[in-house]
Structures are given as C-alpha cells and as structure tokens.
Amino acid sequence: MNKLLNKYKFFFLIFFIGACSYKPIYSGKNYSFSIGEIIFTGDRVINNMIQSNLSLLKEKDDKSKIVYNLQIETSKTKSIVSNNAKGDPLKFEIIIKTNYKILKNDKLLLTKQIEKNNIYNNDDDMFKLQQNEEIIFENISEKISETIISSIINLDDN
C-alpha cells in the first residue's frame, strides 16, 4: 500500500509541476512602444541583469511602435550593518542606485533616480553567501527594470 501511495505522490507532483506555466512578465504583452538603444555605465553585473530584463522590449523592425532610448547608470555599495563581539560581520546591506534617462528622438523626456536596498545575514560558507548576493542582485535588478518599464508606460499614456 505504501509503495502504491508513493507512486501516486510522484505522479501528482509531476502533474502539478507540469501544469504550471511560466511566462516572462513583459513578453506576452503587446505594448505600443519598444526600446531602441540602451547605454549603460556603472556596475557591469547589475547592468547585464537589467539589460537581460529589458531585452524583451527591444526594437523589432515594427515601424508602428514608438522607440525610446535609455541611458542607465548604476552603482552598488555593500556595507556591514552589524558585527558580533569579535568584530566579525553578522549582517550586510547592499544598496543599488540607478539613474536613468528616457529619450525619444534624442529629446530628453524623463530623468529619474531609483535606490533599492537589501539587508541580509552573513554566512560562514562563502559560496553560499555569494549565491545569496547573486539572488539579491537579480531581484533588485528585476524591480529596477519593472520601474523603468512602468515609467515608459506612463509616458506612453500621456
């Protein structure tokens, strides 16, 4: 009876995982704009993550869409928030600052600054700590990308 129950648990698990459909947030939407040129300065890792998120809206030979160009400058700061009695770090804080400009036909439409931060615990395992930081960078980069896209949508609505 136990073996039979385990087989069914396995099939139900596979069924529920397979029934889940993943779609990137902005890929299924049909916007009336696209992103042309993006000029990045600053932190390379954060810039690559933002570019990957915005690539779904990159220009695709559709002349009916309004093309916006972006200038994005990022900076990353990591600091120690608290220490233990020995002076070893217990908590870190990462602050990512992003300044971006939205341009249309070389005319500046919007300038905005975003600052996102995250406080997280230190880990004795350096590999695990680095993985946690990578996840934090990805999450913050996705939020920054969403904010940039929302800004363009708001411009497009006006």
Image (spheres, helix red, strand yellow):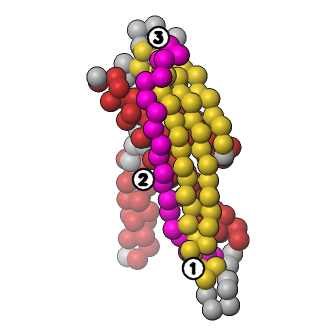
Identify which residue is drawn at 44% across, 62% down.
Answer: 10
Q: Are marks 1 and 3 in contact (CB under 8 Å)?
A: no
Q: Residue furthest right?
A: 126
Badge number at residue 82:
1
Amino acid carrying mark 3 in the image? Asp
Q: Position of residue 77 (x, y in %)?
A: 62, 58
Tell me the element at label 2: helix
Q: Which residue is mark 2?
A: 17
- Residue 7 is situated, as x and y percent measured from the top left of the image, at 43, 65
Is residue 108 on the magenta stretch? yes
Give whichever of 130, 86 is nearer the camera: 86
Q: Percent position (x, y) of residue 42? A: 66, 42
Residue 5 sits in which quadrant?
A: bottom left
Q: Is residue 88 magenta?
A: no
Magenta span of residues: 104-123
Helix, strand or loop under label 3: loop
Work out whether 110 lies above or below 14: above
The residue indicated by pointer 3 is 62
Q: Secondary structure at mark 1?
A: strand
Would you say the magenta stretch is mainly helix, strand or loop? strand
Q: For the residue marked with disc 1, what is the amino acid?
A: Ser
Judged by depth in the image, the label closer to the viewer, 2 or 1, is 1
User: Mark 1 against mark 3, which lies toward the viewer?
Assistant: 1
Please name the amino acid that badge 2 sits on.
Ile
Q: Residues within 10 Å of mark 2 (few under 14, many from 20)?
A: few
Dot placed on the residue nearer the N-terminal end, 1 or 3: 3
Neighbour tally class for label 3: few under 14, some 14-19, many 20 plus, Cα within 10 Å? few
Q: Is residue 114 left or right of residue 91?
A: left
Q: Look at 43% across and 24% down and name the residue there.
A: 109
